[in-house]
Amino acid sequence: MSEEQNGGFFSQIKNQIIAGVGVVVTAGGGLLVSNMEAIFAPEEPQQVVVQDTTKTQQPVININIPEQKTQTIIKEVPVKTEPKPTEKVYESW
């Protein structure tokens, strides 16, 4: 029989407020579950970057190569000249 009772104006407002609070709690729970990894994840250790500010100078390497003297040998060879044939000779296949 209580379902058939319409109740008063304040009773309806009370029911709407309860329904609104339920919707807000449900939405908050959904956001909590969807972001649970980001909220409850352990903090990652920060990587510390160490930068070497001292500048090391490269060692200077001096290589002394003594001057090399090369000997050049020149040999003169006379060119043999063959006489040119005056008549053209055609070979047949």
Image (cartoon, rainbow, N blue to C red):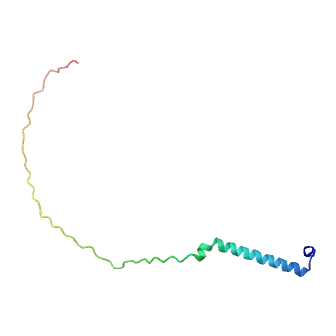
Q: Is residue 66 above or below residue 48?
A: above
**Image location (x, y in percent) of residue 6:** 92, 76
Between 84 and 27, the residue placed more toward the observer is 27
Which quadrant holds the N terminus?
A: bottom right
Up-down relation of residue 78 to residue 23 (above or below): above
At x 17%, y 20%, the residue is 89
Q: Quadrant of residue 77?
A: top left
16 up-or-down from 72: above or below: below
User: Quarter-wise, where is residue 66 in the image?
Assistant: bottom left
Q: Where in the figure is residue 41, as x and y percent of width and height?
A: 56, 75
Q: Where in the figure is residue 37, as x and y percent of width and height?
A: 59, 73
Position of residue 84 in the picture relative to residue 42 (left or right): left
Left or right for 11, reference 26: right
**Residue occupying the far bottom of the picture:** 10
Percent x, y of residue 75: 6, 45
Q: Quadrant of the C terminus?
A: top left
Residue drawn at 69 percent across, 74 percent down: 29
